Amino acid sequence: MTTVTASPNRTGALIAVSQDGRTPLHVVVVDRLDVGRECDGLLLADQRVSRLHLRLELVEGRMVVADLGSSNGTFVDGLRVRAPVVVEPLSTVTLGSTAIRLLGVAPLPGREPVGETSSSAPDPDPGAERLRLRQQTTNLSGVWRADATASPSRG
C-alpha cells in the first residue's frame, strides 16, 4: 500500500497565463518551460510573442525567467528582463500582450511507501487510494490558493 505525501525535494510553480480573447490557463511548472508561438513548450497565439520567447525554470525552489532573444522583450512587473531574474510570487511576467502571473511555489505530491503489503492480500478498501489522492490534491490546491491571496511582503 502507498500513500501520497508532499515531497520537499520536488517543487512546482503554479502560473496563470492570460491572453487577449482566451480563457486564462493555469499551468504547473515542474522543471523548465519554454514559452513562445512555435516551441516545444507553452504555445501562445499572441503575434507580438517571438517563436521562442522566454524560458521559465525552477532553480532551487524559485522561479527564474530568461528572455531568449525575443524581438519585443520580456518584462517582470514592468521592468525589462536583460538577464535571468528570479520571479517572486504574485509578480507578473509580460510578453507581448500576454501576462504570466506566478501564483506560488510549493512541494509537489509524491508517492512514498508507507508499509509493506502482501501482493496476495486484497486491499480492504479499494477506494481508499482514490480518497487519499483526492485529499492530497485538495491540500495542494489550498497551498496555491493561500499563495494567490496572500499580500506580498515588502521590506
Image: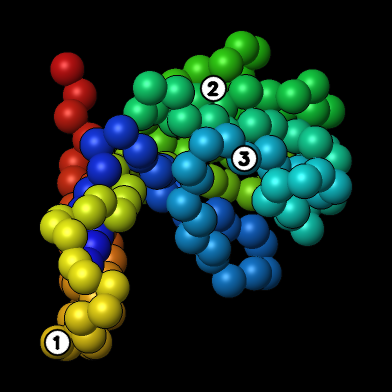
| Image coloring type | rainbow
Residue underneath mark 3: 33
Inter-mark Cα distance, 2 to 3: 21 Å
Within 10 angstroms of label 1, few (less than 14), some, or many (20 or more) residues? few
Identify the element where label 1 is drawn.
loop
Q: In front: 103, or 1?
A: 1
Of labels 2 and 3, earlier in sequence is 3
Q: Residue at x 19, y 67 (%)?
A: 117
Image quarter in which the N terminus is found: bottom left
Q: Position of residue 80 (x, y in %)?
A: 61, 21
Inter-mark Cα distance, 1 to 2: 57 Å
Q: Position of residue 49 (x, y in %)?
A: 78, 42
Of labels 3 and 1, earlier in sequence is 3
User: What kind of residue is marked 1?
Assistant: Pro
| Residue 31 in view in this figure | yes
Q: In the current view of this chain or complex, which residue is farthest to the front?
A: 120
